[in-house]
């Protein structure tokens, strides 16, 4: 279905960059859908996402590359299929949890400085069904197509750097909330894939099968504990414990005002770069963002008690940003992880780079602040953040996160 322009009220007047040029750069040639197989891409198009005429060139390039992916997938399965099937998972994984823009990327990057761990990188999540076969040659030929930083902020980007495994799960199974990038106004297309507990048994098993398949391939590359980071896993503690009873979890939270303004900026950039339609940040998009955060926090607080004692550590973003060494030491102590003596000097070496990071900063209209506080009051209270509501309605400056 080809979409025409549809003018709607924008939220740009409510949230504005407080410095010129708050970060938004194109992410280059690749978008999230370029990792699809032909079959999965056709299945997605069969659900009739709204495609704007200005994105038709992207649809064409995704379709062409999906044929290449399908051929590469078959070749990898023929060469590595038996090895993957035999591979065992020897180490419980570590999951970094938290709502989008709460500091999960910073935490992931810090933890994966420890060489005792491994992680899925950008290439492996973008091409999850053929990376064992193609990663070395393709990255050597195409790394120049990947921008040096992410589109929404100044965090370093590259094929070899840590990335969200949810991208791989989307491309392999289609059972992911990130379907919203293709169906932004059709929540029935993505809402069932947050908790997964309402899915038919067959779809739940398919999701678990694809996740284990991806883990086995990562383990073939490096047989170490895998550190995963996907905000979507914050909704999935029960199924993750069902699969990995000894898994460890680190949950990070942040000032809700900053989460909201940064999340809206994230949505703008992700839909612009990965969407098939032209999305206006209207009142409905704001309501969706407010509801998603409430759902995330409520689900986490409701299910975190399932995690065995000693396997969950909670951390405040502002404290991690101010004292990464001290806070990461507490993570290691809280989870009883070995190897702190190796991670500490690695973080120490990175500190100058972290302090040079230029954060986005946004001004939030006072009326919008009241709406956010009213909707998320329980999170403000639970995590100890003040309301800071102005008596009138001036704009309040809100910093973005370092590598959120």
Image (cartoon, grey):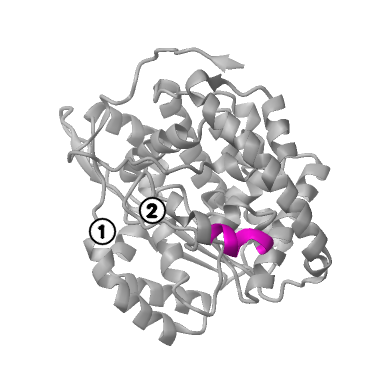
| Residue 357: mark in rendering | 1
The residue at the point 48 percent across, 84 percent down is 339
Coordinates of residue 297 in the picture (x, y in percent): 49, 46
Task: Report the number of numbered marks.
Answer: 2
Quadrant in the rendering for residue 192: top right
Q: Is residue 133 magenta?
A: yes
Whole-percent x, y for residue 309 in the image: 58, 71
- Residue 62 percent coordinates (x, y): 60, 36
Please check the rendered image and state whether residue 366 is part of the magenta-colored stretch, yes or no. no
Element class at badge 2: loop
Q: Would residue 69 be found to the left or right of residue 161 on screen?
A: right
Residue 233 in view here? yes
> Which of the pair 345/147 is nearer the observer?
147
In the image, the segment drawn in magenta is 132-139
The structure residue drawn at horizontal position 65% and vertical position 54%, both measured from the top left corner, is 128
Question: Foreground residue, 248 or 171?
Answer: 171
């Amino acid at each position: 279905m080809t979409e025409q322009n549809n003018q709607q009220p924008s939220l740009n007047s409510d949230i504005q960059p407080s410095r010129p040029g708050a970060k938004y750069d194109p992410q280059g040639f690749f978008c999230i859908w370029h990792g699809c197989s032909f079959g999965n891409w056709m299945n997605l198009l069969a659900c009739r996402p709204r495609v704007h005429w200005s994105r038709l060139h992207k649809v064409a390039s995704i379709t062409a590359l999906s044929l290449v992916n399908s051929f590469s997938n078959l070749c990898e399965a023929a060469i590595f299929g038996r090895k993957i099937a035999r591979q065992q998972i020897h180490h419980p994984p570590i999951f970094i949890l938290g709502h989008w823009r709460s500091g999960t990327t910073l935490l992931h990057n810090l933890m994966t400085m420890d060489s005792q761990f491994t992680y899925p990188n950008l290439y492996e999540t973008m091409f999850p069904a053929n990376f064992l076969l193609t990663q070395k040659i393709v990255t050597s030929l195409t790394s120049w197509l990947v921008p040096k930083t992410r589109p929404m902020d100044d965090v370093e980007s590259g094929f070899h750097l840590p990335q969200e495994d949810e991208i791989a799960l989307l491309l392999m199974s289609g059972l992911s909330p990130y379907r919203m990038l293709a169906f932004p106004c059709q929540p029935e297309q993505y809402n069932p894939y947050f908790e997964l507990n309402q899915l038919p048994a067959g779809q739940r098993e398919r999701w678990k099968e694809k996740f284990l398949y991806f883990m086995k391939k990562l383990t073939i590359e490096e047989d170490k504990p895998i550190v995963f980071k996907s905000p979507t896993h914050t909704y999935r503690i029960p199924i993750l414990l069902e699969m990995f009873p000894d898994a460890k979890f680190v949950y990070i939270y942040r000032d809700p005002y900053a989460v909201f303004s940064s999340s809206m900026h994230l949505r703008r950039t992700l839909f612009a770069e990965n969407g098939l339609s032209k999305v206006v940040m209207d009142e409905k998009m704001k309501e969706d963002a407010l509801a998603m955060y409430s759902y995330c926090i409520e689900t986490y607080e409701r299910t975190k008690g399932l995690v065995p004692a000693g396997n969950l550590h909670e951390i405040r973003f502002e404290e991690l940003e101010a004292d990464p060494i001290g806070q990461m030491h507490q993570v290691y102590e809280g989870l009883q992880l070995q190897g702190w003596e190796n991670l500490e000097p690695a973080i120490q070496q990175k500190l100058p780079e972290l302090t040079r990071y230029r954060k986005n900063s946004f001004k939030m209209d006072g009326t919008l602040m009241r709406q956010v506080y009213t909707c998320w009051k329980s999170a403000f209270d639970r995590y100890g953040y003040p309301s800071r509501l102005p008596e009138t309605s001036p704009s309040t400056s809100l910093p973005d996160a370092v590598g959120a």
